[in-house]
Structures are given as C-alpha cells and as structure tokens.
Amino acid sequence: MNLKAKGILLTGLLLSALAAGGCPNGGPESGTRKEADAPVSYFEISDALRSEGLRKENAYALLSDLVRVSGPRLPGSPVAASAVEHMRRVMDELGFETWLEPTSVQHWVRGEESAEILDQTGRKIDSLTISALGGSVPTPGSRGITARVIEVASMAELDGLGPSVRDDVVFFNRPMDRTFVDTFRAYGEAARFRFEGPSKAARHGAAAALIRSVTPRIDDFPHTGMVGYDPAVVKIPAAAISTEDAEALSARLKKNPSLRLNLRLSCANLEPTLSANVIGQIRGSVEPGEIVLLSGHLDSWDLAVGAHDDGAGCVQAVEALRLIQACGLKPRRTIRAVMFMNEEFGASGGRDYAADPGRKNEKHIVAMESDRGGFLPLYFGVGGSPEAREKFAAHEEVFRSLGLSGIRAGGGGSDIEPIVRQGAVPMGFIPNGQTYFDLHHSGLDTLDKVHPRELELGAIVLALAAFIASEEGI
Ligand SMILES: [Zn+2]
C-alpha cells in the first residue's frame, strides 16, 4: 500500500527514521531499508511504532507515576481527583490538546469491616477475610448483624429455601468455573451472584449477603465489586469473602449448620459528587471532526492501586498517542485518548461523554477501550458489522507482524458502549486473560503484576490500529 499516494502525511522525522532502517534508535525486524522518498507502508509504520515503543518502558513509567501520585482511585475520592489532575498534566506536557469533561459519580466509602464466626454460646471461633461490596449499605448499630449462615450455590437453591432464610446471612458459594479457557465468560457467570445476589436474598427476607470472591484462585484476598441493588427491594449489607475462607466456612457449616456469624460493615454512601473524564487528542489533519477513540477508565477499587484495572488501559491510550506523535505521523482523522471516570460504579463517565452536547459536531468512527488488563495482546478484535471487520481484516498481516494471531470478532467495553450505540465500530486488542481474575478488584492489583513489555506491546498495537483507522476510515 502506498500511503504517500493515498495522501498520508508523514513528517521528515519518520521518513528519515525509516530511511535509516526504522524508527529513531531502532530498526525494522525485517531488516529492509528504504530511501527517504520511497512509499511508506503500514508494515513500515508498524516497525516504527514498535521500535519506538519497545525502546524504553514509557507506558510502564506512566503507570508507575500514576499509581505513585494517586494510589487507589475510588470514584469521588480526593485520590481520584488528584489522578484526574495528574493525567491531564501528563498529556499537557506531551503537547496534546487536553480538557476535562465533568461527570457525576457515586461516592461510597468503605469504613471498618469484620466478620466473625460464633458458636451457639456466642463465643468467637474464627474471623473471616471479607471486603464490603462497592455501594453496600452498612450493618446497623455498632454491633452489626449476628445471624445464622445459609449457604447456597445457585439462585434456584435460594429460591427453593424461600422465606426460611429470613433474618439469616445468605452465603453465595458459587466458584468461578475453572474449565473455561475464556476467563471473562467464567467471570460473567460468577459475578452475577455478586451483582444480583444481595437483592435476591433480600427478597426472601435475608439480613445480609456474603459472596464468594470472583477469582479462580484459592487464597486469602477478597475481591470486591459493585452490588446492583434492586430498587424495589430493601438494601441489605453485602460483602465478598476470600475463596480460602469461603471453603473453610463451607466445611464448618457442613459439620455445624447452626453456626452464627457476626458481620460489621461501617461503609457509607455519601452524596454524589462531581468528577471528570480526562481527554487528550491529536487533531486530525484532514477530517478533524471524525474521531478514533482510545480509552481506559481512571477510577479503580480501593483495595489496591488498580494497576491492571484500569491504570494499564489509561496509560496505554496516552502512550499510543505519544507513539504516533514521536514517529512523526500526522493522522488524517482525530485520535483521542479518554480516561473515563466511574466505570466501577456504573459507568456514568462513558454515558455522560456520549451524551455531551459537544459531541454533536463529532462523529466517532471507531471506539477502543483497553480494560482487560495490561497483559500480552493475543489478537485484535473488531466488532460492528461484518463489513467493518472485513475492511479492517485487510490489514491482518500487519498485526501479525507484532505477534498477534490475527483479527477476529471482538472489541468493546462498558465505557464505550454508549458511543458504540451511536455508530462507532468497537475494536481493541484482546490480551491473555488467564491471570487477570487472580488479581481483579483485589489487593493484588499492584504495579509489580504488570510486565513492562506486555504493557508496551498493547500500546503499540493500539497506536497502529488507531492510525490505520484514522487513515482508512471504517
Ligand atoms: Zn476495569
């Protein structure tokens, strides 16, 4: 493909870099050399992006700064507010056009939490490792709830018990199905108990809900997540229990079904507060009103710094823009990075972004969200119509040259759903998800779990996909 013939604007920086055998300080793995005035192909652009992207650990440095400056970024918290300022400053310093767009967020605070197993006399036998679910109401008074524990493994089992669980703690002990290769599918099935379980239990009169953490590992780290209260039912306190303690509690209950549990949660739902989506872009040189969107979500859970979920996606979007700029590419359409706020508490950032009146002069042609962890990209996903996929699949070999297996159906994310409903084609790389749910929403989601090369490769793939989409349209 002759990009110069197609009107692609390349600066002297890229052309001279390619002429020298690759991007600045690197070389194409193919080893081909080009004259400065030779046509430039997507393979050569891919080489340039790869060379620049793997030369240093830029995305990793951005992530390291983000988690050091901010820490856990629960929506509405002062830490999340500092992360907003930080990411805008980072993109300002890179020379992108930047701004903030306000979004109202739920402001929930965790407080103290404990769960103790008691014998019939009320004596403490053991304590359990728990973590309140996001949005949970607190337990009443200072003594919390003391009640029987009723274990169920399915919604049908709960319904079968019906009103007999009144005033009890319902313990949803449904493990993640380890037999699926697609861990996201297994997660979706098990996370339903976390999201819907508390209100299902409340419907039968339960006093509280305890949910087995949604992870395939057996360890002592609770994994939190948002509870989805049914507005028609009374809200009951809800917490996640570590898988190790879920197994131990289950074993105890088999020996002694009359065990009681004392649950204390002092979490609180405060007034909603204003936060912001953070936006940076490289304006399109020919069609600035057409947007190729790259995104992640800046908020995280509070049990760790959210390095994979989703600090990784945010810094990959920024790094992708930096790569395009550093390689001297002048995209035809606008390439925009958005760090959405409040994904974990209902994705209001994505909804407000799509609904903003400022969008009316913009047409989003492509939307990508990296929110599956900063792991090694396996393949590239293109959603939307079969025609869109076919059009993009014409560039499959370029993606293969970066180690991806090819282009398949896929792409999407909760923040970009509203903009996809308005017509943007969802896309994105699909990373290796085998270990994501080991750490997702838990105290294990820390910087040391992210491998710099895997993170950088994701940013390179995003930069390549964004640039091709900006040149070709979809
Ligand atoms: Zn996420």
Image (tube, helix red, strand yellow):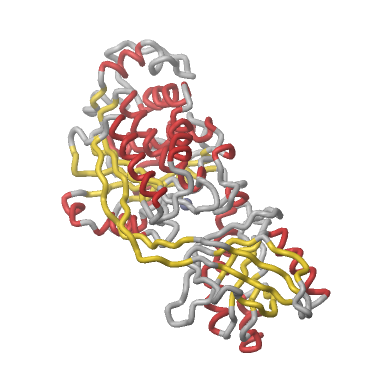
Q: Nearer the viewer, residue 281 or 48?
A: 281
Q: Which residue lies furthest to the front in this view?
A: 142
Image height check: is 73 above or below 150? above
Work out which residue is located at the far bottom of the displayed protein and give it. Answer: 163
Residue at 50% over, 47% down: 306
Q: Can residue 256 be seen in this view?
A: yes
Q: Nearer the viewer, residue 200 or 120?
A: 120
The residue positioned 67% from the left and 56% from the top of the image is: 178
- In the picture, which quadrant includes the N terminus? top left
Residue 365 against residue 194 in the figure, above or below: above
- Based on the displayed image, in which of its 4 quarters is residue 194 positioned? bottom right
| Nearest to the observer: residue 2 or residue 354 | 354
Place residue 209 in its image quadrant.
bottom right
Q: In which quarter of the image is residue 4?
A: top left
Q: Position of residue 228 (x, y in %)?
A: 47, 70
Give 245 or 192, whichever is nearer the viewer: 245
